[in-house]
Image: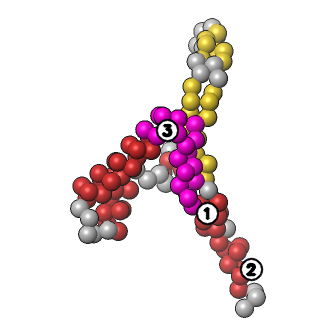
């Protein structure tokens, strides 16, 4: 397993984490909210809509045209049909927060020098 796969959060872990953060909500209600959110986003993308979450990023569809591919086993040419694939573009705030965490030791020493 790669590092990215080991650090992934599953849907059930997300539900569990939210249920812990909001004890006034029943776990089944949190699960329903997460399911509804993800289903709504999936349906919007299936309809060709763009999803924009301020501070997080946006989901858009990229069109991949039909092309000729090759069967690796036989070497035969194969037509690969066109398709639409979802693409996530992180927003500025998310990029900065992720970058800040990875570079916090460097930026921490700069910020203290002016005080």
The 10 Å Cα crowd at callout 3, few under 14, some 14 to 19, many 20 or more, is some
Q: Which residue is mark 3?
A: 45
At 39% across and 50% down in the image, what residue appears? Answer: 37
Query: In the picture, which quadrant includes the C terminus?
Result: bottom right
At 43% across and 53% down in the image, what residue appears? Answer: 9
Q: Quadrant of residue 79?
A: top right
Q: Secondary structure at mark 2?
A: helix
The 10 Å Cα crowd at callout 1, few under 14, some 14 to 19, many 20 or more, is few
Using the image, tell me which numbered label, if any, was put on residue 101.
none
Q: Taking the image as drawn, is residue 46 in sight?
A: yes
At 40% across and 44% down in the image, what residue appears? Answer: 40
Q: Which residue is mark 1?
A: 93
Tell me where residue 22 appears, x and y as whole percent: 32, 68
The 10 Å Cα crowd at callout 2, few under 14, some 14 to 19, many 20 or more, is few
Tell me where residue 47 appears, x and y as whole percent: 48, 34
Q: Quadrant of residue 72?
A: top right
Single out the mark in the foreground, 1 or 3.
3
Magenta residues, start to end: 43-61
Tag 1 near tag 3, CB within 8 Å: no
- Cα gap from disc 1 to disc 3, whole angstroms: 23 Å
């Amino acid at each position: 397993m790669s590092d990215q796969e080991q650090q992934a959060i599953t849907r059930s872990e997300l539900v569990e984490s939210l249920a812990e953060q909001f004890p006034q909500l029943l776990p089944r209600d949190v699960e329903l909210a997460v399911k509804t959110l993800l289903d709504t986003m999936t349906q919007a993308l299936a309809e060709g809509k763009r999803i924009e979450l301020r501070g997080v990023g946006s989901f858009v569809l990229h069109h991949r045209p039909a092309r000729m591919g090759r069967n690796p086993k036989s070497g035969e040419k194969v037509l690969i049909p066109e398709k639409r694939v979802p693409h996530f573009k992180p927003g500025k705030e998310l990029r900065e927060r992720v970058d800040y965490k990875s570079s916090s030791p460097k930026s921490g020493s700069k910020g203290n020098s002016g005080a």
